[in-house]
Image (tube, helix red, strand yellow):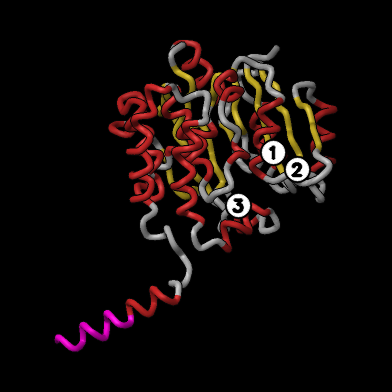
């Protein structure tokens, strides 16, 4: 069995996929396997994958007969893992040659740690630099501890600290196997809810080296995949972000990663997340009775000016 299993969930990935695979297969730490889970692509993705399967025995290609949805495909990609460690890989990202070696070294040296990530260079579609995301200093999860890491993650919509990007770090495979499935969520920003179980369930470590490049598209994945039921829900449901907040507590309480002793911390995370999303908890027109109430209130205020 390889040391590292990499799960790559993809759909119509022909533009970026070769670059991503070359960077993974070119890692200085080469004891790895790459499982590509193709969500019924309709472009040349299957042909590209077939070429890589032929030229590198570490690559395995799995094609779904129908598009099962983005989140379900993440779960499927993880289910193929056989290695001691696991990571998800986006088809449009890039990893410097030393990435795997450094994160594997951290997990080997720190058996109490379940997840490791490096600094991230975010780039545009043309690979020009957008910004650098790091977790050094007072943002380092080693110093924060589990509760404050959870709260920083829950408040991510407002604080912009991007702890949800730890999702693309290296995990101990048994944690991913025992985690509640990503596809259990049908809310906006599911990664923040999903990663909360790892914040409470294990310790995180950070390597202060820029070894991962993440592509930021002009349109979000929700907008780029408009045919998915998940995307339609996010774009059309006025209460979608309220549902994100309301999903956090039951999701964590049903996760095998979160011990009962940590449940007392969950309500605080819900409050922090609600405050973070306060401006978008309801995004539609006000119901008629509410509009009438505010109209009357405004008119009454004018009488007393």
For mark 3, give the secondary structure.
helix
Q: What's the mark number on residue 221?
A: 3
> Where are the magenta residues, as a range?
295-305
State left or right for residue 22 relative to residue 40: left
* Magenta stretch: includes residue 300: yes
- In the rendered image, is residue 302 in sight? yes
Secondary structure mostly seen in magenta is helix
Q: Residue at x 69, y 32 (%)?
A: 77
- Mark 2 or mark 1, which has the lower sequence index? 2
Q: Residue at x 48, y 48 (%)?
A: 244
State left or right for residue 285 relative to residue 184: left
The residue identified by callout 2 is: 39
Question: Can you say whether 101 is above or below 127 in the image?
Answer: above
Frontmost residue, 183 versus 14:
183
Q: Residues within 10 Å of mark 3 (few under 14, many from 20)?
A: few
Q: Quadrant of the N terminus?
A: top right
How far apart marks 2 and 1 lie (CA) works out to 7 Å
For mark 2, give the secondary structure.
loop
Q: Quadrant of the C terminus?
A: bottom left
Number of marks in the image? 3
Q: Residue at x 84, y 42 (%)?
A: 65
The residue identified by callout 1 is: 73
């Amino acid at each position: 069995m390889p040391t590292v299993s990499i799960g790559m969930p993809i759909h119509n990935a022909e533009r970026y996929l070769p670059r991503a695979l070359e960077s993974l297969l070119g890692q200085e730490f080469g004891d790895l396997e790459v499982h590509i889970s193709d969500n019924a692509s309709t472009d040349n993705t299957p042909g590209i994958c077939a070429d890589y399967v032929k030229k590198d025995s570490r690559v395995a290609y799995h094609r779904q007969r129908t598009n099962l949805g983005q989140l379900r495909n993440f779960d499927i990609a993880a289910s193929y893992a056989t290695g001691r460690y696991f990571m998800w890989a986006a088809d449009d990202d890039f990893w410097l040659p030393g990435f795997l070696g450094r994160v594997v070294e951290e997990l080997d040296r720190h058996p109490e740690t379940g997840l490791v990530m490096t600094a991230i260079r975010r780039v545009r579609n043309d690979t020009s630099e957008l910004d650098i995301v790091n977790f050094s200093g007072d943002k380092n999860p080693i110093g924060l501890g589990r509760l404050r890491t959870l709260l920083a993650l829950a408040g991510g919509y407002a604080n912009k600290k991007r702890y949800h990007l730890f999702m693309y770090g290296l995990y101990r495979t048994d944690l991913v196997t025992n985690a509640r499935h990503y596809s259990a969520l049908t809310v906006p920003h599911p990664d923040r809810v999903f990663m909360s179980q790892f914040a409470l369930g294990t310790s995180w470590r950070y390597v202060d080296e820029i070894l991962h490049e993440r592509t930021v598209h002009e349109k979000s994945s929700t907008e780029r995949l408009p045919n998915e039921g998940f995307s339609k829900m996010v774009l059309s449901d006025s209460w979608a972000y309220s549902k994100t907040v309301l999903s956090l507590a039951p999701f964590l309480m049903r996760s095998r990663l979160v011990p009962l002793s940590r449940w007392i911390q969950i309500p605080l995370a819900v409050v922090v997340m609600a405050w973070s999303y306060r401006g978008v908890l309801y995004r539609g027109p006000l119901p008629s009775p509410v509009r009438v109430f505010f109209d009357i209130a405004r008119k009454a205020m004018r009488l007393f000016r």
